[in-house]
Amino acid sequence: MSEKPIVVVGSGLAGLTCAWAATTPVVLVTAGTLTEGAASMWAQGGIAAAVSPDDSTASHAEDTWRAGAFAGDRPVIDRITGEAPEIVQVLADLDVPFDRASDGSLDLALEGGHSRPRVAHAGDHSGATITASMAAAVLAAADIELRENHTVTKLLTDDSGAVSGVVVRRADGTEETIDTDRVVLATGGLGGLWPHTTNPRTALGQGVALAARAGARTDDLHLVQFHPTGLDVPRDPMPLLTEALRGAGAVLLADGERFTDELQPRDVVAAAVWEQLTHGFAVRLDARGIPDVTTRFPAVAELAAASGLDLANDLLPVRPALHYSMGGVTVDGRSRTSVTGLWAIGEVSRTGLHGANRLASNSLLEAVVTGRAAARDSSAWRTGWDVRLSATDRATVLPRGDAEPIPVQEVRDLLGASCGVLRDGPTLQAAVDALQPHTGDDVAYVAWLIARSALAHPHSVGAHRRTDSVEMQGARV
Ligand SMILES: Cc1cc2nc3c(=O)[nH]c(=O)nc-3n(C[C@H](O)[C@H](O)[C@H](O)COP(=O)(O)OP(=O)(O)OC[C@H]3O[C@@H](n4cnc5c(N)ncnc54)[C@H](O)[C@@H]3O)c2cc1C
């Protein structure tokens, strides 16, 4: 057993779960204060789990597989959806106040792509409630040293390529090195790299940069999910109108007419919204028909009100916004990456659960399942690293440099233009060429990896829609 502490990077739901479940000492390093900058705190809908008597984990797995355009990894889907009921119980045992029916059973919401109501929730602020409960458990635990306002800027490796430490930058700009042979990346997603996003602006994919520069394999970085109903008001990030609104009966209108089945998987609905917008129609979400909508969705009502809109009486302007990264640092079932001593969990990881399009409310589930798996494996790890992952493409392993970074807004504009709802080869090639000279900078490096991945995948699948692909010839969007 290693004598050094496990270093967990990030304090969203994945990192907190891992720190809490570890059985050896942990240093929890996080860029802001505890849970600050975590998308986990922003989740509205909840956590998907087959807990009702008329549901089954097989049905949850089937819906996940189908929503992911049959591109997910079936054994992974079966395992993670299979653990979901137990995970909800683990959270309930941590006193997460899930909404319940009068008989005490969980009140389950319906969301797009699910064949039945399956989303356990705490009002429409489920992420904040679940994450706060896990944070309280972390603060109460022994053997967790918390380093707030510490940003990991580099992963150190030894001559054999194994993890040997991390470099952290403190709030005052000074740096220190933490010596460790076990690092768990829980740094979240990369939606902040797009001009229109629901993600925290700080979600710039830094975990992908750290891992890829250390030689870890990444996959599916081009597979990013656009949420169909970002509230289209001049706010950055865009407020999210949760899918649960459509599950409760809200409809989408283009110039007053319905144009799609609102409960299809997100990639399909986002593409349908995009098509209407590109034809010049104003797209709006109509939630006026939901009984007691403002009491059922108080957080959304507040978000709308902050932009002068009334959820109960107004039509809400919407547009697709970058929401979630299906790809990331490739891991096995224990959350091990291809680099010895490096685990990745939550949204920064690519587990194979989501395929080419994430099923709604499967990511909080993935955060807890992968966090717990990494905790168990890293706590027990001694030597050796028997992962069965394909080799990393060495052409993508580039060092961090001192070159003048490209402004983040420029990177966003490049990805917005090239890696939006619709993509094509020449635009992607131009983005790759524009980003290539700046790969010494982490933000540009991650954007380059994404555009490069999109360019290398000429076929359309799920959220990756190439207008120049055979699949899209003759298609409407
Ligand atoms: C608006 C919104 C609504 C959503 N709704 C749902 C939902 O209803 N259900 C669902 O399942 N999913 C939902 N999601 C997705 C889900 O919230 C995320 O996928 C999930 O919470 C990711 O958890 P995480 O722990 O991996 O990352 P995060 O919660 O994003 O946490 C990342 C942490 O890493 C830290 N960090 C990053 N880089 C560094 C660094 N270099 N050094 C130190 N610390 C670092 C950050 O500060 C943060 O603490 C939603 C997402 C958004 C944005």
Image (spheres, rainbow, N blue to C red):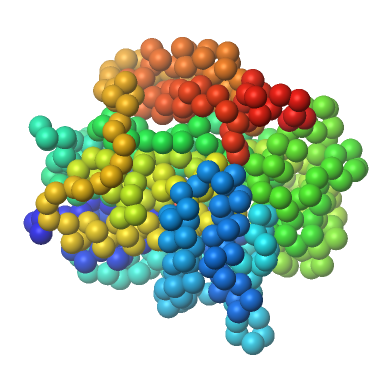
* Residue occupying the far right of the picture: 256
- Image quadrant assignment for residue 44: bottom right
- Nearest to the observer: residue 264 or residue 98: 264
Tell me if 147 is positioned left or right of 10 in this view: left
Residue 84 on image: x %, y %: 48, 67
Residue 390, placed above or below residue 145: above
Q: Is residue 14 visible?
A: yes
**Outermost residue to the bottom:** 103
**Which image quarter is the N terminus in?**
bottom left
In this view, the residue in front, 101 or 267, is 267
Q: Position of residue 42 (x, y in %)?
A: 54, 53
Is residue 277 placed above or below 228 in the rendered structure?
above
Above or below, 69 against 288 in this view is above
In the figure, residue 199 lies in which quadrant?
A: top right
Q: Is residue 209 left or right of residue 361?
A: left
Exactly how many numbered labels are in the figure?
A: 0
Q: Residue at x 39, y 24 (%)?
A: 445
Residue occupying image coordinates x 49% and y 72%: 85
> Residue at left 32%, top 21%?
395
| Residue 170 shows up from this direction | no
What residue is drawn where x is 79% and y is 56%? Answer: 250
Place of residue 41 in the rendered image (x, y in percent of width and height, measured from the top left):
50, 55
Q: Quadrant of the C terminus?
A: top right
Residue 61 percent across, percent down from the top left: 54, 60
Along the viewing direction, whichever of 313 and 257 lies nearer the viewer: 257
Horizontal relation, residue 256 to residue 83: left or right = right
